Image: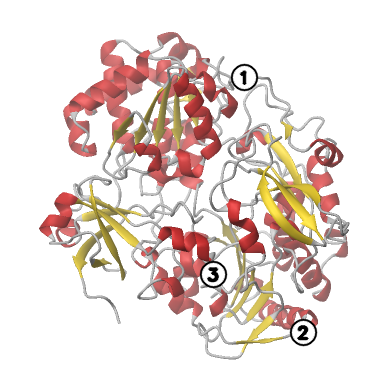
Amino acid sequence: MSQSKIHLGTEAKKHRCVCPHDCPDTCGMTVTISDGRAIDLRGDKEHPFTKGFLCVKVNRYLERVYHPNRLQFPLKRVGRKGEGQFELISWEVAIKIVAERFQTIADSTDGPQAILPYSYAGTMGQIQGNSLDRRFFHCLGASLLDRTICATAGAVGSNMTLGTRAAIDPETVVHSKYIINWGSNTSVTNMHLWSLMHQARKHGAKIITIDPFRSKTAGHSDWWIPIRPGTDAALALGMMHLIFKNGWEDEDYLQQHCLGSEQLRERVEREYSPDKVSHITGIPVADLERLTKEYATTRPSLIRLNYGLQRHYGGGMAARTICVLPAVVGAWRDAGGGALLSTSKLYALPGHRLERPDLVLPGTRTINMVQLAEALHGELPGPPVKALYVYNSNPAAVCPDLERVWSGLAREDLFTVVHELFMTDTAKWADIVLPATSQLEHFDIHHSYGHLYMQVNDPVIAPLGECKPNTEVFRLLAEKMNLPSELFATSDENLARELLQPETHPADQFVAQGATPRGAEKPLKGITLEKLRALGPVRLNLPENYAPFANGYFPTASGKCEIYSSTLAAMGMDPLPTYTPPAEDPLTRPELAQRFPLQMVSPPQPSFLNSSFVNVQSLRRDEGEPTVIINTRDAATRKIETGDWVEVMNDRGRFTAKASVGEEVKPGAIVSQGIWWREYTIDGKNVNVTTSSSVTDLGGGATFFDNLVEVRKTMVPT
């Protein structure tokens, strides 16, 4: 019921499929099948946006599908937790064990809220990512998971200003004349948008990158502006100071389409002088003045802001503040102008039809996924977590405060189930491990947060061994636990039709959060599963060269860009854009900085996607070993040279890596790219043993880049 029928013949045949990974590009792919086996995979040349080329990771996707260590059968732990010792069991036995343990916990005095699902973006598909899984845990009465670890601070901050996420039609970037990659390594993490930026540059556009780290994008830009981590809002406010001072604002746009422009003008004139902003950000006044003049006087101008800049305590306010800039200069008026964070809300997908939030029992608690360490140690309100079901995530590698996560996973009274493709760091802690399908083995439907095309992914090979997709596992568990059959007795294809159907659905009273701009009210009109199968990628029902806020009509309560936010005022927060320093900031925490003076940021390795693909040998060989990038000046005071083993430490933990000394990172900051699995590090630790489980000002997001550390040379671990 869960799978589309797979036609396996002896003649090689090419099929369309979709990259499932957490990336805005959501690439179209083609895969060639012969004798039931995938023998070739490459980009879909007919995809209107991704146009036939893939990133280095997904180019090697078949190495992942046919990896020799792929899990293919259910497993039961026989050794100590964390040792990775398991025995084979049948699916029948596995489902029985899980269902009985869940039922026992649900019937106990702790109740079903002692069960915690844990998932994120291991697949971005709507069916395997968030459909029957949600229904299952809602029916069970389990704790809710607030999935905040990546993007919520920026999303909520942007929403406070615009009523939705900052968005444009990405295909209009070819019209841009001034492009700022703000905290965005676009050439690596959004490579098809980078291709459009490159086309724009051929027609005279200038590309700037603002980042503490000279990433590949910064290195290929016309100008790299190194900024002190966590100070992006101060830079934006300093730019506004200069814009108003020099009369570069679009007064008509501010008056017609914005609330609070006069209060903003007064604030930035009074509080954010160039000298003060330079002191906060580490950017020379001359560079601040040049950047502002070029941005404010060039049309169309575009800011590509990304989620790296919001991974500190003030991250939500930082994203909100940057989203004000296009309104101040009127950049929203132009095709190819404005700001881009995510296109996801332009789809207006009724995900509630799949997830059924109406099934959630009143009073059910919500646990922030960033605070898994606290949850596993019983430090949050409500019953202790007695069962953990992990899918589409690898928390034992990606969570902050990682050593406390490990000690929580080591609890003998914790029952852990992991549904995975590989024996990840998390799977090694499990009591039951269930083998998962890859994207080539199951059905799904995809939107994107970086372009405007819906796509369908049909299975093209039979599941390896006894692997099953998420939906099938939750059907089996629901049946075993006697949950309402009408919620689960539907095919994956029918779930997709349910998502796309235009008629009013019984669950439509629970509308999806996030409004859409004018012109995007019916973006899914005419898009059906059958049309996606027949035509491949189908563009949303939006105008060509779509500029969502050209004439205002922001999807806020006021209908305007809310520079002054009454929502924030009601929350007891500053209603105007402001600068909120990181929680671990050398300027505001000098006593902490005396011990740990370096600000560390930890973006993903280009060949990895967070912890995904780390076990693909060819990609790991490309990246070498875990590395810490340190500025020449900071290295000299510590007598560190390139190639030295160093220890990175703070009060939360320490890990070992090789030093790379140079000018690729701003003085006072270091970069450690990740996220490495324990078995591929020299000391069994990765960067997240040092990161904090504190959350952001808005959205409860992760603060991975709000992290003061010290670095010292060390001996090679033995």
Disc 3 residue type (three-letter): Gly
Numbered label tally: 3
Residue 209, image x, y percentages:
36, 34
The one nearer the camera, 90 or 262, is 90
* 578 relative to 432, above or below: above
Disc 1 residue type (three-letter): Asn
- At a point 22% along the width and 32% down the height, the residue shown is 277
Disc 2 residue type (three-letter): Val
Please rate how many residues cluster around mark 2, counting C-alpha atoms within 10 Å: few if below 14, some from 14 to 19, many from 20.
few
Please rate how many residues cluster around mark 1, counting C-alpha atoms within 10 Å: few if below 14, some from 14 to 19, many from 20.
some
Q: Which residue is mark 1?
A: 545
Residue 352, image x, y percentages:
72, 47
Real-space Cα separation, disc 1 to disc 3, in angstroms: 50 Å
Real-space Cα separation, disc 3 to disc 2, in angstroms: 31 Å
Q: Is residue 499 left or right of residue 430?
A: right
Residue 388 lies in what quarter of the image? bottom right
Q: Which residue is mark 2?
A: 93
Q: Which residue is mark 3?
A: 382
